[in-house]
Image (cartoon, rainbow, N blue to C red):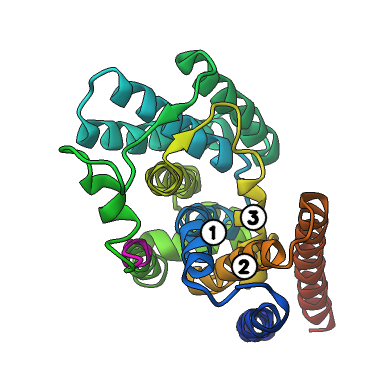
Amino acid sequence: MVDFVKRVQLQKLMALGALILLYVFFSIFGRGFNSMPMTLAILSRSYFVGFLAIGVTFVIITGGIDLSIGTVMMCSAVIGGFLFRNGVPLWLCLLIMILIGTTFGVVNALLVTKLKLPPFIATLGMMMVSAGLGSIVTNVQAQTFPSPMGGGENAWFARVFIRDGDLPTGVFFLAGYLIITLIILKKTKLGRYTYAIGSNEEAVRLSGVNASNWKMLPYIISGFSAGLASIFFAAAYFVITPGIGQGFELDAIAATVIGGTSLAGGVGSVTGTIIGVFIMSVLAVGLVSMNLPTPYQVFLAGVVVIGAVFMDIQRTNKANQVKKEK
């Protein structure tokens, strides 16, 4: 396990190096990549994907997966927008959006821990449920949130969560959440049990700990994070269309794995995840700056996802080989 952790730390350093190389590459070959609009595009994308990725990191460390976070984020956003359009105060809409995401997290947790459904199947089902629910509530109509250019009493919304002039204030919210979750993973009982469950859930259970209850919390955190992400997505894009959201979970999961979190469970960190998030964001915006058609962008993003999973499998196989030799 010590060797495995060292390899994960090396993976984190390699990810940081890859981020720097990608930025330099697109700065040279991308059109206007170093401009302020491109920088804001990278940061705006990183806000909501960052929250999704931090949340799903907890789940993946336990050896699970959450495929529903993308559509849960969009479901929370469109329902929040629907309520806002129908006269509900904006601050209350934001709280409801977080509550919706957390509720989906609770349902995922119950399906996995109490009904013993495989995480892949449980969260895949909730992906479909959340996508359908958002469309049903809004009657498949796009919903709008206040923009920075708009006036009125709600003009604070986008300025607070995205930028104030040229200042990307959303980065500070993401940094604050990163610090909180880092403390949870490294300094609390929840963090210790999260790693322990991912390493050997049966051993945790045999030690007298209610592993099922502790395993619920990472899924709830993932849903809560998706609810937070919905606020930043709404602030960044203003117009939310029901039925979209699939694909963001792949960006978040890929970022998590790129950052050194193992799909086998037991190893990972939110700091590595954030590095992975910026790699995915720089790649997405950088490909746009090179005027590549959308199919090429999707193709290359898929290659990155496959590469990240392949590297994780290689790390896991080497760790298992070391255990057998001992």
Q: CA distance from mark 3 to mark 1?
A: 12 Å
Kindly identify the amino acid type of the residue bearing the numbered disc 3.
Asp
Q: Is residue 250 left or right of residue 188?
A: right
Whether residue 176 sits left or right of residue 277 in the image: it is left
Q: Which residue is mark 2?
A: 261
Packing grade of label 3 (10 A; few <14, some 14-19, many >=20) is: many
Residue in the picture at 75% in, 66% down = 308
The image quadrant that residue 13 belongs to is: bottom right
Q: Nearer the viewer, residue 166 or 19?
A: 166
Where is 320 relative to 215, above or below?
Answer: below
Say what secondary structure mark 3 lies in: helix
* Amino acid type, label 1: Thr
| Residue at mark 1 | 57
Of mark 2 and mark 3, the one earlier in the sequence is 3
Q: Check if mark 2's residue and mark 3's residue have beta carbons within 8 Å.
A: no
Q: CA distance from mark 1 to mark 2?
A: 7 Å
Residue 288 spot, x, y in % from top left = 68, 61
Q: Is residue 324 above or below residue 236?
A: below
For the residues bearing labels 1 and 2, Cβ distance under 8 angstroms: yes
The region drawn magenta spans 168-174
Classify residue 303 by image quadrant. Answer: bottom right
Q: Give the quarter of the figure containing the N terminus.
A: bottom right
Residue corresponding to mark 3: 251
